[in-house]
Amino acid sequence: MSDNQEPIVTIFGGSRCGEDSVEYRQAHRVGELLANAGYMICTGGYLGVMEAASRGARENGGRVLGIVMNQFKAEPNRFLTDKVATEHFYERLQNLITRSVGFIAIRGGMGTVTEVSLVWNKLQTRVIEPRPMVLLGDCWPPVVESWRKWLDVRESDAAVLDFASTPEEAVKIIMSKTKGVIL
């Protein structure tokens, strides 16, 4: 990233939620808050949480990077300002991860679980340098607690995660842990 470009925060979440859902409203607010704080946001570029975060950022003068996949037939959402097309899921995930100074995950499906798991594993094994991974919403604490109960997930593994109940709290965590960070 060059010195004149905003730091990037990647937002993960489901593609199935509509404008009337809690997740859509959370993502829209996260995009708005991050744009107002001077961050560029990055998403997978399509519908649901990705569209909501993109829309929130664009409506507030922010830039939005969509990491899209050539295999998908769907059109990317209309709120993207920048786009990177990839051929495969892993390439897409790598782009979503390596460009970002932090991450916010909002309730989604198995794609979101995959994204959270990969980032979490990379942080826990120190494959990537420490950066905030914020899990936004009431769904995440019981999910992580279930993984801790049934899988070999230690307290030290869970310690790399941050939990937030509101978009404001999530963005505050990102801001406090990324001040002055440039990748």
Image: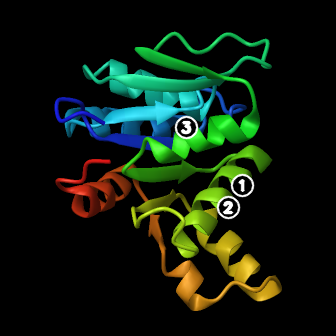
Instruction: Looking at the picture, tell me which residue is in the foreground, 75 or 170.
Output: 75
Q: Tell me, yes or no, if residue 53 can be seen here.
A: yes
Circle 2 SS class: helix
The amino acid marked with disc number 3 is Asn
The amino acid marked with disc number 1 is Val
Instruction: Looking at the picture, tell me which residue is in the foreground, 46 or 128.
Output: 128
Asked if residue 27 lies left or right of residue 34, the reply is right
In the displayed structure, 26 sits above or below 124; it is above
Residue at x 63%, y 67% (from the top left corner): 121
Circle 3 SS class: helix
Expressed as whole percent of the image width and height from the top left, the position of residue 33 reads: 29, 39
Distance from Cα at disc 1 to Cα at disc 2: 6 Å
* Mark 3 Cα-neighbour bin, 10 Å: few <14, some 14–19, many ≥20: many
Residue at x 69%, y 84% (from the top left corner): 153
Please tell me whether mark 3 or mark 2 is closer to you in this view: 3
* Residue on which disc 1 sits: 113
Expressed as whole percent of the image width and height from the top left, the position of residue 146 reads: 75, 78
Residue at x 60%, y 31% (from the top left corner): 44
Expressed as whole percent of the image width and height from the top left, the position of residue 68 reads: 63, 23
The amino acid marked with disc number 2 is Ser
Whether tag 1 and tag 2 are in contact, CB under 8 A, the answer is yes
* Residue on which disc 2 sits: 117
Expressed as whole percent of the image width and height from the top left, the position of residue 122 reads: 58, 64
* Residue on which disc 3 sits: 95
Q: Tell me, yes or no, if residue 22 can be seen here.
A: no
Distance from Cα at disc 3 to Cα at disc 1: 17 Å
In the displayed structure, 95 sits above or below 115; it is above
